[in-house]
Every structure is written in C-alpha cells, then in structure tokens.
Amino acid sequence: MKPNIVLTAAFPAVARDLLANDFEVVEHPTEQSRSEEEMITILADADGAITLLSDPLTRRVLSSNPNLAIVANFAVGYNNVDIEAAREIGIVVTNTPGVLTEATADLTMGLMLAVMRRIVEGDAEVRATGRCEWEPLKLLGSSLQAKRLGIIGMGRIGSAVAARSYVFGMEVVHHSRGRGMPLEELLATSDVVSLHVPLTAATRHIIDRDALAMMKKGSYLINTSRGPLVDEAALCDALEAGHLRGAGLDVYEDEPAVNPRLLERKDVVIVPHIGSATEEARNGMARIAATEIVRFFRKQPPLHAVT
Ligand code: GLV
C-alpha cells in the first residue's frame, strides 16, 4: 500500500509531480486560519504531510494520528510547529531554507525603497488624480545612501539584505545571537531597522514599546520575518506620535488579520506575506518539501530537519 501524503494547501505542481508515483496524495484547498480540530481531521489518515506556515501543528494535533511520521513545513520558519512535541513523539519535521533567501531579501529592499521613497503614496496619487505633476516639495522621502541599516538577525536572509544594502551606499550594522553591535546601540543609532530573526519565545516582541522608544527619531522599521516580533499596538503608537517616520511590513502580529490602525497610515507600506512569493522560490520550496517526503519513505536521512 502506498503511504498517504496530505497537502494542506494548493502548493506548486512540482510537489504533486514528485509524489505522484509513490504516494496517495490528498490535496486540501488553501485555508489560512485552521483550528486544531480542522488539522486533526485533515491529518487523520496521513502518513506524511506538507503543511502551511499557518497550520497549527500543536502537541495535540501531532499526537492525534500515530501514523503521522513526517511533516514537511512549506516555509523556512517553523514557529507553527511544536518542535519539542514532534521530537518526543518521533515525528520528523523539515523546512525549506535557502531557496527563498534572495526573494525575501529582494522584498526587504522593495519595502525599504517603497516606504523611504513613498512609492505607494505616489502610485495612489497618480491613480486618484489621473495626473503627474512635478513639484519641488512633493512626496519628499529619504535617501538610502549614507543611512545606517541595523539588521537584527544576520543569518542567510539578513546577510543577503546586507549585500544589497551596500550597493545602495548604506552603512550596515547587525545584532545576531548576542554578536555584533549591542541591540540597544543598534536601535539607538540606525536609520532603518530590519528584522531577520526567527520567531521564538526569546524573540517574540523583540521590538516592544521600550525598543521602539530606543529607536532613533525619524527612523524606519522593516519586517519581513514574523509579525509577533513586533508589538504592533506599540508600533502604531510610535508612528502616530511621529517617533518613527515609517514602516514596511510583510508580516503581522495576528495574521491573517491586519491591525486597522496600520491600514489607515500612509507612512506604512503593507503587503500580504509575500517575501518568498517568486515562482523560483515557491517552486524551490515545493521541490524541497516533496523531496523530504520521498527521502523519508526511502529511509534516507532528511536534508533539512528541524527536529
Ligand atoms: C515564510 O514566511 C517562510 O518562513 O518561509
């Protein structure tokens, strides 16, 4: 009998193609806010699964089906998985690092440029008026050149952002696992702060009210990592008070919901968690996830295990 593999969303076709011969594959429609109960139902007959970053893979879900042997999470982040529980139960968990590094770094630069050069405000103006009027004082933003970029988390994506930022003439400093510049100094001296750490208990609200107060007046915050790294209510307060000049956000504290206070602000550029949304990156992620499933059932060791 072929093992059952559950795809909890419509992933790129390459995933199904790689699994087609050796597995019974069941694909579920993409669904953002699944409850534990829904996950338990979906995974009831699964021997393995490719899962979404929003799927709650809690201890209760992971222990609900004794046949579930491998979860290939379709993301580099795996904060949706109770890794300790998976380890204890003996479920292999894998992620998809590497293939989305450049795409996410590109989006980080895109958000930085969009917010600092007010690109979205300009787009909205032209659409609303149907006109393009050159004015000496209109939509003045901030140059990237000679600004200090503080990168929190100098891993694969943080390093790729640094490489791009040098080309724009930025000075780059970083804080990473206790190395580099002390966090307080980075916050107090950077013109732009960009977040590239994974979400863990230690990094949740790493940008809280105190951290925001420490940030330089008139600086910008960019987040393409995970929403709960930032205390969003405190961020809204800092923007409303004019302490921060703007923010570029790809991720939100309560996804899929977005704080309505952010939606009202022209100085915030908001996109829907599209850091890895290039054909190249998503196909690469699908290939990695499906390959991990194939390898597991061939008794080969995982290439990207997080357990
Ligand atoms: C996307 O957010 C990912 O973790 O891959």
Image: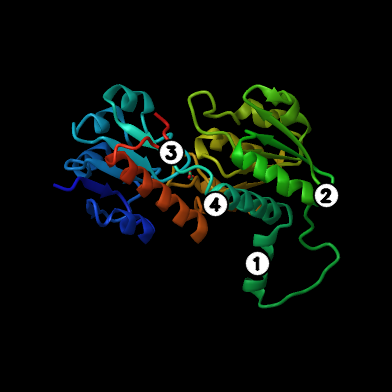
Left or right: 249 in relation to 301: right
Residue 242: percent from the left, percent from the top? 71, 41
Q: Is mark 1 within 8 Å of ligand 1?
A: no
Q: Is residue 265 visible?
A: no
In the structure shown, which secondary structural element does the residue marked by tag 1 occupy?
Answer: helix
Which residue, given by chain and number where applicable, does mark 1 sit on? 123
Indicate the secondary structure of the residue bearing disc 2: loop
User: Of tags 1 and 4, which is closer to the observer?
Assistant: 1
Image quadrant in which you'd find residue 121: bottom right
User: Mark 4 highlights which residue?
Assistant: 263
Q: CA distance from mark 4 to mark 3?
A: 40 Å
Compared across the picture, whether 156 is left or right of 276 comes to right
4 and 3 marks in contact (CB < 8 Å): no
Q: Quadrant of the C terminus?
A: top left
Q: Are marks 1 and 4 in contact (CB under 8 Å)?
A: no
Nearest to viewer (mark 2 / mark 4)? 2
**Rendering quarter of residue 236:** top right
- Indicate which disc, 2 or 4, sits on the residue closer to the N terminus: 2
Kindly report the distance in space between the C-alpha atoms of the residues bearing marks 2 and 4: 28 Å
Circle nearer the N terminus (2, 1): 1
Using residue 55 as the reference point, say whether residue 222 is left or right of it. right
How crowded is the residue under tag 2: few (<14 C-alpha within 10 Å), some, or many (20+)?
few
**Circle number at residue 299:** none
Q: Can you identify the residue that label 3 sits on?
A: 303
Mark 4: which amino acid? Answer: Leu
Residue 244 falls in image quadrant: top right
User: What residue sits 62% from the left and 33% below the top?
Assistant: 153
Q: Which residue is mark 2?
A: 145
Residue at (23%, 53%) from the top-left corner?
Answer: 25
- Image position of 243 with respect to 165: above or below: above
Q: Nearer the viewer, mark 1 or mark 3?
A: 3
Residue type beneath disc 3? Leu
